Image (cartoon, rainbow, N blue to C red):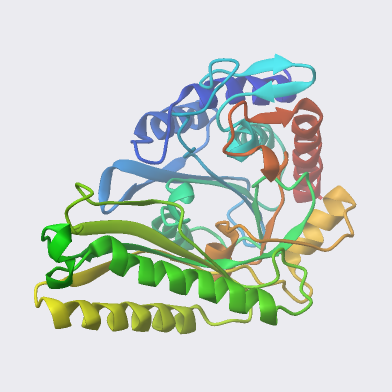
Amino acid sequence: MTDMVTARSLLDRLVAFRSVSRDSNLELIDWVAEWLEGQGITVTKVPDPAQPAKASLFAQVGPDVAGGVVLSGHTDVVPVEGQDWASDPWAVFERDGRLYGRGVCDMKGFDALALAAMAAAARRPLKRPLQIALSHDEELGCIGCIPMIEAMAGLPRASAVVVGEPTMMKAVTGHKGGLAFWVEVHGHEVHSSLMHTGVSAILEGAKILMWVNEMNAKGQAAAKASPFVPPWTTVHTGEIRGGTAHNITAGLCEFGVDFRVLPGEDPEDWRRAFLAKVAEVEAGMKAVHPNARIEVNERFALPGLAPEVDGVAEGLVRALTGDNGSQVVSYGTEAGQFQVRGWSAVVCGPGDIEQAHKADEWLALSQFEAGWAFMEDLIERLCA
């Protein structure tokens, strides 16, 4: 079996695991570990200290020296519920030069290529090591990789980390950071005809959401030239629920507030501004009823990826792909988590982010093939 065929077979197997972020990924991790060990590769599993049903893993082939390369991917995918798929999302279907299935683009396509590359590299006389890192909970804010990255400190330090999110095999050297909060507004229920004596959690929560709109409007008005699209820090709410009946002032309203922060801006400034607005609204609520309150739970804080001056990872990817363009993205990746912990990092992988998270998610077969060519050239470079 050729290495390209191996990669394609691995993609079929990986997609079959329903590793949605809300669920366990242990079945996938255990299978990958067994497969790598079957290639003679030693694997280190990293259990999530807070979630027994989740884990990451890393492995290395080649000499135990510094200066190697990490291939970084995540194993979790987004749900398929509510999406109208033309075929089974948990199987890979090839149609018209495209591979369809949940995660083929984001990012089990890269994972399959990286695993096949590890097996191929294990048979070669590497002078520098190739490492693989497969995480969990990337879709929940790039938080599952943190224990894994910290555990990787025991490996020889790689000179470059390639995070294989879909970039059409181009070098992405910067992305926004992120903050995410879940807000619970607890009001005081009364009959809506006497609403002045109660505290509507929905109406009070709306004051925070109006602030969200105001921040976006101010950001857009003050935006300066930037490679990021859009060129300002965005604030977003994509989920909200609350209330029990139309004639009762809502006792509870819950929603998320997410920030995508431009590099160069301090996320802590946004955190303080947001919490100050929450405190202001809560004070008004308590003036009506002392038990009214707002609880804020921080879900994640994701560091951005800053373009590096003479970055080793960027130089490696440009040498392998021939890409000389300048690309940054507004979504977050685990590259920021690696970079803030001292690694040189770049984002480069097969596929287009436009295809991620949708019904009938797909990866062009030509991109999968380009990804394998990248792996072959990388292995050659590590042998030189």
The percent position of residue 30, horizontal first and vertical second, equals 39, 31
- Residue for point 27% across, 47% down: 51
331, 277: nearer the viewer: 277
Q: Is residue 259 visible?
A: yes
x, y percent for residue 235 = 52, 67
Please identify the residue farthest to the front as the structure is shown: 193
**As rendered, which of 178 and 229 lies closer to the eye?**
229
Camera-nearest residue between 239 and 188: 188
Relative side of 226 to 323, left or right: left
> In the figure, residue 28 lies in which quadrant?
top left
**Relative to 25, does residue 378 appear above or below in the rendering?**
below
248 sits to left or right of 101:
left
The image quarter in which residue 158 lies: bottom right
31 up-or-down from 241: above or below: above
Looking at the image, residue 219 lies above or below residue 116:
below
Q: Quadrant of residue 120?
A: top right
Horizontal side of 309 relative to 24 (left or right) equals: right
Q: Which residue is at a point 80% across and 51% down the rendered structure image?
A: 170
Which residue appears at 65% of the width and 66% of the height? 344
Q: Could you tell me residue 266's position as x and y percent?
A: 53, 82
Quadrant showing the N terminus:
top right
Residue located 52% across and 75% down the image: 214
Residue 375 x %, y %: 75, 40
